[in-house]
Image (cartoon, rainbow, N blue to C red):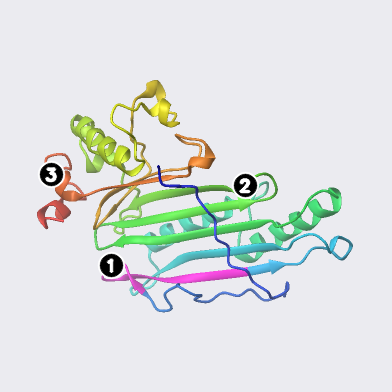
Amino acid sequence: MRKNLLWTLTLVTVVTLLTPALIVAAGAGVPAGPIPVTKTISAVMQHVQRTAPPPADRKEALSAEIDLTYPEFTSSKGPDPVVDKLNQLIRDRLFGMIEGEKPTSVDQLVETFFRDYAKALKEDPDQPGAWSLKFEATIRHADDDLLSLEMLQSAFTGGAHPTSMSDLLVLSPKTGARIDLPAVVPPDRMGELVKVGERHFRKVRELKDGETYEEAGFLFEGNKFALNDNFLIASSGLVFWFNPYEIAPYAMGPTELVLPWNELKGIVDPKGPAGKFLAQGK
């Protein structure tokens, strides 16, 4: 029997009522001190949790919750355009979760989301509440040459389930620019990478020998496996992530593939940004 890979979203329940001050601090599981990124750049994880009760005339409705975790980068050299670029990237992803006019601060994001929640409850007597907004940006790898980030974005404003997705990013901590897959794997070796990815995909999703993707419930174009460009570089290997609805119905959940470096020799460019992992035999 296949493993049940249904993605279960776990929200931290906060029992405090809506107050003027934000809770911004290291929470459970969030590192309290600076995280080294390069010799001069570090990050401090910010944690924001808020709960808003329903309006007085809708006391039967469920509260709204916000849970945000993200790194804030600083440089020991003082003002740094690369640090500014990294922090702006985080803010753009975070603030982009709000529809309509984009907020310019976390306070404004919280205010807008809770205002929309209260408005929806007043306008729709069948709206049960239980709105949630979750953003979790995690540093998966960091050194002087590479910064790999995973960003989980999940929102629920009614319906059958939350809208959830994870973006994987590889950035240069020297420039702040994104590193794309062709910089890691030359185009003429991409077919070999896909073969490694397919082998791991079939194992992770427990496909039977000879079973087609369509028969297993997957939606690859032409019933042929393909990798996406949602990847990051980690010490364990090249990591790819398929979001819900991307290649399968929501109920089948997301898929994470970790392609070990020892299977990527001759595929990954040894002179590229991930070449050092091959040299270290990881």
Q: CA distance from mark 2 to mark 1?
A: 39 Å
Task: Report helix, strand or loop for mark 2.
Answer: loop
Who comes first in sequence, dot 3 or dot 2? 2
Residue beneath disc 1: 38
Residue shown at the point (45%, 47%) measured from the top left: 5
The answer to if 45 sits in the magenta stretch is: yes
Q: Amino acid at mark 1?
A: Thr
Task: Report helix, strand or loop for mark 3.
Answer: loop
The picture places residue 254, in percent across and down from the top left corner, at: 45, 45
Residue 210 versus residue 79 in the image, above or below: above
Residue beneath disc 3: 265
The picture places residue 248, in percent across and down from the top left corner, at: 47, 35
The picture places residue 224, in percent across and down from the top left corner, at: 34, 25
Residue beneath disc 2: 161
- The magenta span reads 35-49
Q: Amino acid at mark 3?
A: Lys
Mark 2 or 1: the one toward you? 2
Which quadrant does the N terminus fall into? top left
Residue 251 versus residue 45 in the image, above or below: above
Task: Report helix, strand or loop for mark 1.
Answer: loop
Residue shown at the point (55%, 60%) measured from the top left: 10
Do the residues under discs 3 and 1 have CB atoms within 8 angstroms? no
Which quadrant does the C terminus fall into? bottom left
Q: CA distance from mark 3 to mark 1?
A: 26 Å
Seen from the viewer's position, the closer of residues 250 and 77 is: 250
Mark 3 or 1: the one toward you? 3
- Tag on residue 121? none
